[in-house]
Image: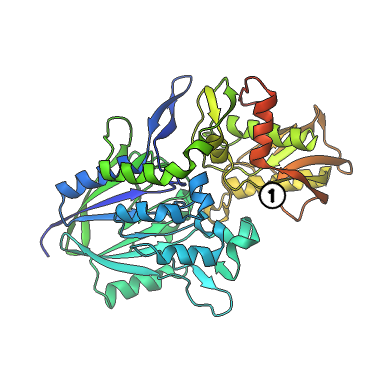
Amino acid sequence: MSERKLTILQINDLHGYLEPHPEVFRARGGSRYQTCGGLARIASVFKQVRAQRPGAVLALDNGDTFHGTFVAVNSQGEAMVPLMNALEFDAMTAHWEFAYGPAQFRKLASSLAYPVLAINCFEVDSDRLVFAPSRIVERGGVRIGIVGIASNIIDKSMPPSYSTGVRFTLGNTELPAHIERLRTEDRVDLIVVLSHLGFAQDAKLAAEVAGIDVLISGHTHNRLYRPVWIGSTPIIQSGCHGSFVGRLDLTVSDGKVIDVQHELICTDDSIAADADIDAMVRDTMAPHRDFLDQVVGQVRSPLDRATSLEASMDNVLLDAIAGAAGTRLAFSNGWRYGAPILPGEVTLGQLWNIVPTDPQVSTVELTGEELRAMLEANLERTYSADAYCQMGGFVKRCRGLNLYFKMENPKGHRIEDLLVDGKPIKGGRIYRAAMLGEQGVPKKYGSNRQKIDMRAVDALQGLFARTSQVRGSRRGSVVAI
């Protein structure tokens, strides 16, 4: 086989962002923000690269695509289908798509012009795979086997309705057989693994499993400005919200990758919108525009989720639910998704972007011992020394307490000091807290759970209505020492 050229284009963790939006970038002394993303800009990148490499481009989507904004959630993902089909992907895998329940996701997948792939999602009753494990395509004279691995945490750390009738494995034990089948029976030249396990998990997977030529990663929102090599396997991941497109140019000879060039393409204002996709996006948004553009208040400082231990956006959300519930303590999940909100007017659409699941606000009573145990478990799921045991997003978002911990300590022994009202917690004391669903406080912790007549977006609206200018900040609630 002579040398062949192949280009892989990737997006991961779009989270329903159809239009350009603010994105956070690190700068000296803080953060800066610029407008990025939008499907019309992504389409322009795809069109340009396809023109450069006719017949030699593979387009892949790592999932977390059809959920995360009002338009996505309101339609259970269906409003996005024509748009994603127009981008002409070759395959995707999944995570938050299961938030609508496996039955709805199967319906959604059946409407796509490309397959959902997952070697690790099984029907509980029959043990059959829910989706195809792999797909074979030919691009630029290279025969490619694409293997999909969905997020494995859906039945472990997310609401039970997300995994009704299905179960998930890591995929690490199943993958070698699929690689062997594609190599020996299907005679592919190249194995590309499309994974939503997360970067740390994918790095461990690439070290364990032989025969992966390229690993396309998602879930953890890593901006990899250059490939990470695990042995002879390059791994790329490309941020989130459509703010970046990953490009990987490969030279292949005799079934081996002999050269790799990579670019993390920022979809900023320098990229013109594709006119056709732009018109489709406008049409998709039009029925909701007046509703989403309602101004609900003002914010004085940027709100974002760009930090692992706590985030200004989540502190505002916690203030809102604590105010609605009449508590000092509050907990929510450490979600990674949610584009920044810049100082000035805040719209209803931006509130939905903060918490698109819009769960009901609840209260719970926790003993001091339960508080410590819950937070220790969360730190383990976030920072476990074993990448396969990392099952969270960011650290659980906390209000009304101060947590000081040592990240490097072993499981169950990370917390050094845990204070409420400036005083060490007492094991037998009862602490009442507001929370958002089971991801805020898992069912195994606490008692006397009470739902209040308020959902998360309404609580946020209430906060902005009674506060002339909301200010977001990081308060030192959770500190690594």
- The outermost residue toward the right is 428
In the image, taking residue 455 as reference, residue 260 lies left or right, namely: left
Residue on which disc 1 sits: 437
- Examine the rendering and report whether any part of residue 210 can be seen: no
Q: Is residue 77 above or below residue 18?
A: below
Residue 382 position, x and y percent, is 59, 46
The residue at the point 43 percent across, 61 percent down is 208
- Closer to the camera in the image, 324 or 50: 324
Residue 181 position, x and y percent, is 33, 75
Judge the density around disc 1: few (<14), some (14-19), many (≥20) Cα neighbours within 10 Å.
Answer: many
Task: Please identify the quarter of the rendering in which residue 253 is found.
Answer: bottom left
Residue 267 position, x and y percent, is 33, 36
- The type of residue carrying mark 1 is Gly
Task: Please identify the quarter of the rendering in which residue 90 is found.
Answer: bottom left
The residue at the point 58 percent across, 53 percent down is 391
- Closer to the camera in the image, 410 or 276: 276
Callout 1: SS: helix
Q: Quadrant of the C terminus?
A: top right
Task: Please identify the quarter of the rendering in which residue 257 is found.
Answer: bottom left
- Examine the rendering and report whether any part of residue 429 can be seen: yes
